[in-house]
Image (cartoon, rainbow, N blue to C red):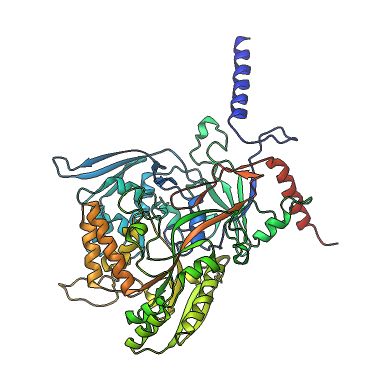
Amino acid sequence: MKRLLALILCAVMLLLSVAGCTTLEKDEETGEYDKGAIIPMYLGTEMYSFDPTVAYLNDSNVKILSLLYESLTDIDENGKLKMSLIKDYEINDGDRYGEYKMTITLKDTKWSDGRSVQAADVVYAWKRILDVDYDCEAACMLYDIKNARAIKSGEMTIDDIGLTAPETLKLEIEFEHSIDYQQFLRNLSSPALVPLREDIVSKSADWAKKPATMVTSGPFMVKSVEYNHILRLERSNYYFLDTDKNEVYDKYVIPFRIENDYGRTLNSMLSSVGQTDPAINTVFYDSELPLDQRAAYKDYVTTTDLLSTHTYYFNLNNPLLADARVRKALSLAIDRQKIADEIVVFAKPATGFVPYKATNGKVGTSFREEGGDVISATADVTAAKQLLSEAGVSGGSLRISYYADDAVSAAIANYVQGAWAALGFNVTLQAVRAQIDINDPVIYSDTFHNFYTVDQAKENRWDILAIDYQMLCEEPFSALAPFATDFSGNGVDLSGDVEDDEEYPVVGHMTGYKSDAYDAIIEEAYAATDIAERTEKLHEAEKMLMDDMPVMPIIFNQNAYVTYSNVVSGFKTDYYGVTDFKDVKMENYMAWKKVFDTVAETQAAPAA
């Protein structure tokens, strides 16, 4: 009898514990706890690959990837380093054997298919980036690892890397010498350095394009994708949850589902929310406001700076763009202040390549503020024409290629077309669209991203490429180093013949930019052990880069979003400026679910 009472008491206590620690409501019919809120949102431009090492040509992609993959560390909105996948770490800074090593123990969590996230997944992901045959600008952030740089340049094999997983949750990293270990840990917040599963990635080149072949380690997983229509994300059932303890599903992630309908806009949100029939196209979060309404809603949005610069890449293989004076003239003709204020609205004029959120050697400082304006925010057409005259160029034909689905890129390209036409250039605009895979109707090929290679540049498949350059971490080295030949992340050129005593040439930056002086400055910054000296060299590098102008920064991107605050709350942002949805609550969400279900049934019903 006592045992029975004890069991009943335990059951009651468990029920009270669940009820007191969960936001989940009970289903009126079954009496069981519901899974949670379904929140319609509009996160931005559509993406066609969810591979975290390549999906960085549009700022909207970063917003989505941050929901899917958990990084080893994180940096909060105040710049404080936080451990995400890392449980603890130890540093051996040169013992009697001369070893420089960091040992990381990972937290216990699982992938969206239930398999544990392991140290071997980190090893695989980083080896993939450093492989000589894999092009990735994130490689330079790993060059402090023993033999990493030599591997990327083809001098050693990937098996020589100072990176091992001696235990399931233990990662050992050996370095060439003593480094700034805290900065290395901060760099591990990069979305490009997240763990990946070898058994998933190696199975198919299209592994990151459809839910059936994808697994994620973050708070959400891709439940379904209907390209040109909807992206449905659902809470991962395994994100830090201890399945042996029967923990409630919303312990770490509150929303059950996020639905991103690419047909929804702010117009539908404003016209439907709060009406007597609040359904159909209701949107509770919108971070891609229509350009024609941004000015009107400027006082009602939450705005954060991003580590992102809308940038034009010049193809230096094009004879018309080979002269730096021509590239500088094209830049001088642009009124960045006008673009930021009147066209994009939620942006700042790019007065350099590195945006404001990048640190200047320590937390709480800004590389941009310290370095000041390296390029002008306003246009100087007279100076532009003078440079063209000195270069002996009076005009020519140029083509600007941009994401077709990105309204901001399209609007900027239209403005630039007019500005360059005033200089005598015939500028055509190429809106690049994704193409359906003829072998798989579910998969789309990201044609625009396919342009982003050295080979495509050499073949003159594009003249000017409009991208949102995403800084891979808060430290400016990661943004400036890839323009140096040995730090480009593009490996070596194995296509030609070399003598026995020669090495294969390093490919260099995809634009074709090559400067011995710039290479030297980046080498000095890389070798500098003093933070002040390193930062000074990086400022020199940025000035030289903007003087040579292989890339033309236009605006610093911002994340600006509006929410229906009477229903949803709990939005946070990290240092990258990306919104965190883990703690978002939806008031009376069961009632809203009934509305969504009714709408779905109505839309599915056959016409009378």
Residue 319 visible in this rendered orientation of the protein: no
Q: Residue at x 70, y 41 (%)?
A: 590
Q: Judge left or right: residue 492 versus residue 9.
A: left
Q: Residue at x 21, y 52 (%)?
A: 529
Q: Is residue 318 above or below residue 178?
A: below
Q: Is residue 33 left or right of residue 159?
A: right
- Tell me residue 401's x, y (percent): 48, 75
Residue positioned most to the left: 96
- Name the residue nearer the viewer: 291 or 280: 291
Query: Which of the pair 74/202 is nearer the observer?
Result: 74
Q: Horizontal and vertical percent for residue 85?
A: 41, 42
Is residue 34 shown left or right of residue 314? right
Q: Position of residue 321 (x, y in %)?
A: 37, 81
Q: Is residue 497 above or below residue 26?
A: below
Which quadrant holds the N terminus?
Answer: top right
Picture residue at 32% right of the left edge, 60% below the top = 371
**Rendered location of residue 500, percent (x, y):** 16, 73
Quadrant of the frame with the C terminus: bottom right
Q: Where 530 sits versus 22, above or below? A: below
